[in-house]
Every structure is written in C-alpha cells, then in structure tokens.
Image: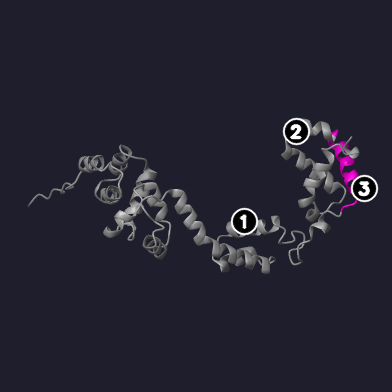
Amino acid sequence: MTNVFPMKNAKDWKYYDQQLTELRVNDVENIIKRGKLLIEAKEELEHGSFEATVKRHMSADTAQMLMAIARNPILTKTDHGRLLPPSWRTLYELTKLDNDVLIASIKDGTINPKMERKDVMNLRQKRDNPKRDEAKAAIKANPTAPQKEAAKALGIGLSTYKTYKKELVDAGEINPANPSKPPMKDSQVYDVPDQEIDDIVKLFNQRFGDLRQCHKEDVMAKMIRRLRIAASGVGLRDDKWRRLQGLVTDVVFTNNPRSK
C-alpha cells in the first residue's frame, strides 16, 4: 500500500509576506497587485494564517478594500491604470460607482490621477440627486402612503424614506399635523395671540421656576423640552410648535416685559 501524504501549499505565508513587503509603493499598479495577492492568499492559506499575514502589513479593513479594488473589472483594466488616482482610499470609493458611471467618468476625464476622495463623493452625490428628487416628489404627492410599501416602490430603504419625508416637513412642504392638506403659510403659523405666549411663560414659571433664570443655568435642549411641555399645557398644536419655538424663545429671552 502506498502512503499518501498531503501536499504542502506551493506558497506559504512567508511568500505572501515577502510579496506584500515588496509592493508597498502606492501606485495604481501596486495597489491592484496587492489586492489580487490578498485574494490569492485568502484562498491558499489556512484560516488564521491569512489573518496573521494581513495583520503584519495592514488592518483587516484595509485588506478588504484592496481586494474590492482588485475585483473591480473596470479599475483593473490595463489601459485604465494611467488614468486613475494612485490612492487606494480613492480607488475604493470608486468601486461604489456603477460600471457604466465609471466608464463614462474615465472617458470624459472626471476620473483622473489628481482625483481625491471628496471628488468621488461629489460624483456619487450628483448621481444620486435625480433619484433623491424623484423620491421627494413622490412623497410630497402622497405623504400619507404607508411608508414601508412606498419606500419599496421607490427603491429606497425605509430609513432613507423617513429622512426625505422629515426634510420635506422641516422645509414646510408637508403639513405635519395633517399631511393630506397643503402646508400652512408662515402667516398662519405665526398668527398666535399674545395671550397664548403669556400663558406659556406663566405655566413655565409655575412648573420649572423663573424662565430667565432657568435659561442662564440650563442648556438650550433642556429649555426647548420644557417650553414644549408648557406649550402643550396651553393646548398649542404640534404644527404650530414646530415653527413657533424660535419665536417663543426670542420673546421670553429678550427684554420683552412678559418674561420679566
């Protein structure tokens, strides 16, 4: 019977250790070679050995980014190398763009050797703006739609949907009290009788002590919460409170006779 011995890996950790050391120069070619070498090492080395090898040269996150660059079919094309920025961080950001956007941006010179991460962010933002505007228009047209279903129909996440909706509310484009109705005009929002402001100040003083003294001692966030309680106590509606809080604080923190 012939003894069968397991074949030893043709390339051990020492080989990859040496190769990674030799590829330290940050140019596009070496960045891609490092990524490809890491992909190979991950397949060749045993679990634990690969992680230890990576740790001697870079963080695990950096290794993941380099491998992502090496897997990108557009960035790794030979004739594109001289047109790309020699920064692995910038190249990684470029992997987040669709291939058609990458090709067009390389062709028109938007992507070039001097490009920085902030430029990629701007490029991504320009790409996302049409979708953002489309989503906001749909939310504004039907603000009472079930959020989960509406987000799915628009092809965005629920948290993104809620963020867009909040932006519309804050901008006064959606009426938060009754989304099915048009937003109130500023003249309607600020049309609050002086007596209501007097009542807010009076109630605040009864519950929390002298308003002006509290303002000196408390941070603004706590003050706003306390004013909100006082406003609720006199029946001030939420839709008015959103824009009125600035007016109320202006009134009670200035030399207005009511706040004295």
Disc 3 + disc 2, Cβ < 8 Å: no
Name the magenta segment's main secondary structure: helix
Left or right side of 249 for 101: left
Asked which secondary structure carries label 1, the reply is helix
> Residue 253: x and y, percent?
82, 38
Question: Which marked residue is nearer to the observer: mark 3 or mark 1?
Answer: 3
Give me the residue at 33% from left, 38% from top: 55
| Residue that carries the numbered disc 2 in the rendered image | 218
Asked which secondary structure carries label 2, the reply is loop
Q: CA distance from mark 3 to mark 1?
A: 36 Å
Instruction: First in sequence, mark 3 or 2: give its number.
Output: 3
Where residue 251 sits, quadrant-wise, is top right
Instruction: First in sequence, mark 3 or 1: give its number.
Output: 1
Magenta segment: 192-210
The amino acid beneath tag 3 is Gln
Mark 2 crowdedness (10 Å alpha carbons): few <14, some 14-19, many ≥20: few
Q: Nearer the viewer, residue 85 or 237?
A: 85
Give me the residue at 59% from left, 67% from top: 134
| Residue that carries the numbered disc 3 in the rendered image | 195
Give me the residue at 63% from left, 67% from top: 137
| Residue that carries the numbered disc 1 in the rendered image | 163
Mark 3 crowdedness (10 Å alpha carbons): few <14, some 14-19, many ≥20: few
Q: CA distance from mark 3 to mark 2?
A: 26 Å
The amino acid beneath tag 2 is Asp
Left or right side of 127 for 54: left
Above or below: residue 6 compared with residue 150: above
Question: Which marked residue is nearer to the observer: mark 3 or mark 2?
Answer: 3
